[in-house]
Amino acid sequence: MAYAFQTRIELECADGFYPRSDLSTYQSDDFELRLGDLHYRDVREYAVGRNTSAGWQERRDATNDPLPVTRVWTDFLPQQEVERVVPARSDGVEFGMEALARAAVSGAEAVSAALDSLPELYAEWRRGQEGMMTGLAPRRLKTGQALLENVDTAGSRIRDGIDLLKRDTVAREAFGLMNTAMAMANRRREAVIQKRLPGDVDPPTWRPFQLAFVLLNLVGVTDRNSGEREIVDLLFFPTAAARAYLGLAAYAIVLRRLRGSGVLGAGISVIMRYALRLLTPLVSSARSNSCGPMMTMAGRRLANGRSRLDSG
């Protein structure tokens, strides 16, 4: 009796293998599957595995034109390169945490000057996405139109969040304290990484998607009667999504204390749950790096008869 491990089948063809497009989800009624069909409509497959994955070698010539794929194989541990996401320039929007904290203290006009351009830039990006829909197949066009409707909804919610900060002094104060706490946490973190003093590192900033996510959820978190409380927003991003969640959590905690003294401001404000044991160190780091500075800073501001901030 003999056993073979990590075996694979490999084929070679000097003329090249013929690619195919995966149309298995084109007619699906599941929106997530149709979304994948739209996103990966230009992806070509040169091999398909059975109870395994498949791989192939893609090459290009000196002019960057694709060459025939001449090798394919089965692959039990396939690899895929995830390209780095770099935010586009967002002129006219203030992303600095400390600058936003100062704007919140200064008042509605300063908040307007710092943030009003963000939904406009988002709408400009949306128009560019709409232009990419030319020539799509009918069902993919319908999926794209549904996505654009979601973009319009998100843009409106971002704008509503900014308007809330302009008219609601308590929400604006909570937003300012949250930015101060997040800035303190990020300075502390970067100081450890760079082996410098917190005051010597560059001023911490939000990434565009992080700030947009916070603003998008402000009305739902602030207004107890808002219909947005029925919405569950999932932020799925290759990296740094946790900072947006932590910022929104800090806002909710501070807002609750500002609105009520004593037991009225007490109680659990945020529940953080990570399903994988592997992420336990990340959660501990998040609590120490974000909640610690927030409790130190906000505790001074909210000490007047209000319950203390704590994490556990």
Image (cartoon, rainbow, N blue to C red):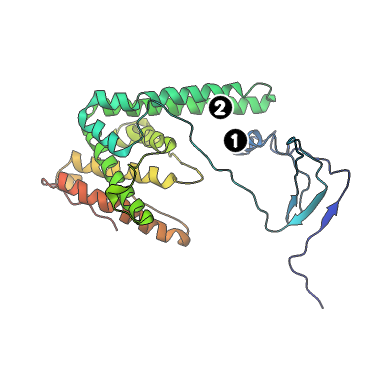
Mark drawn on residue 146? 2
Cβ–Cβ below 8 Å for labels 1 and 2?
A: yes
Q: Is residue 111 visible?
A: yes
**Mark 2 residue type:** Ala
Q: Residues within 10 Å of mark 2 (few under 14, many from 20)?
A: some
Specify few, some or many for label 1: CA neighbours under 10 Å numbering under 14, 14-19, or 20 or more: few
Does 126 appear above or below 254?
A: above
Figure quadrant of residue 253:
top left
Identify the residue at horizontal 48%, vertical 46% (top origin): 239
Q: Separation of disc 1 and disc 2 at Cα? A: 10 Å
Q: Circle 1 is placed at which residue position?
A: 31
Which residue is located at x 67 percent, y 27 percent? Answer: 139
Q: Position of residue 136 (x, y in %)?
A: 68, 25
Q: Residue flagged by tag 1: what amino acid is it?
A: Phe
Residue 15 falls in which quadrant of the image?
A: top right
Quadrant of the image for the N terminus? bottom right
Which quadrant holds the C terminus?
Answer: bottom left
Residue 302 appears in view: no
- Asked if residue 256 lies left or right of residue 64, the reply is left
The residue nearer to you, when weighing 58 against 77, is: 58
Name which of mark 1 and mark 2 comes first in the sequence: 1
Helix, strand or loop at label 2? It is helix
User: Does 160 sit left or right of 23 as displayed?
Assistant: left
Which mark identifies residue 56?
none
Q: Residue at x 17, y 50 (%)?
A: 307
Q: How far across and down, in percent of the image, does residue 128 sit? A: 55, 23
* Foreground of the two, 95 or 269: 95
Nearer to me, 182 or 172: 182
Q: Residue furthest bottom?
A: 1
**Residue 175 drawn at (x, y percent):** 27, 36
Mark 1, secondary structure of its residue = helix
Rendered position, 46 above or below 8:
above
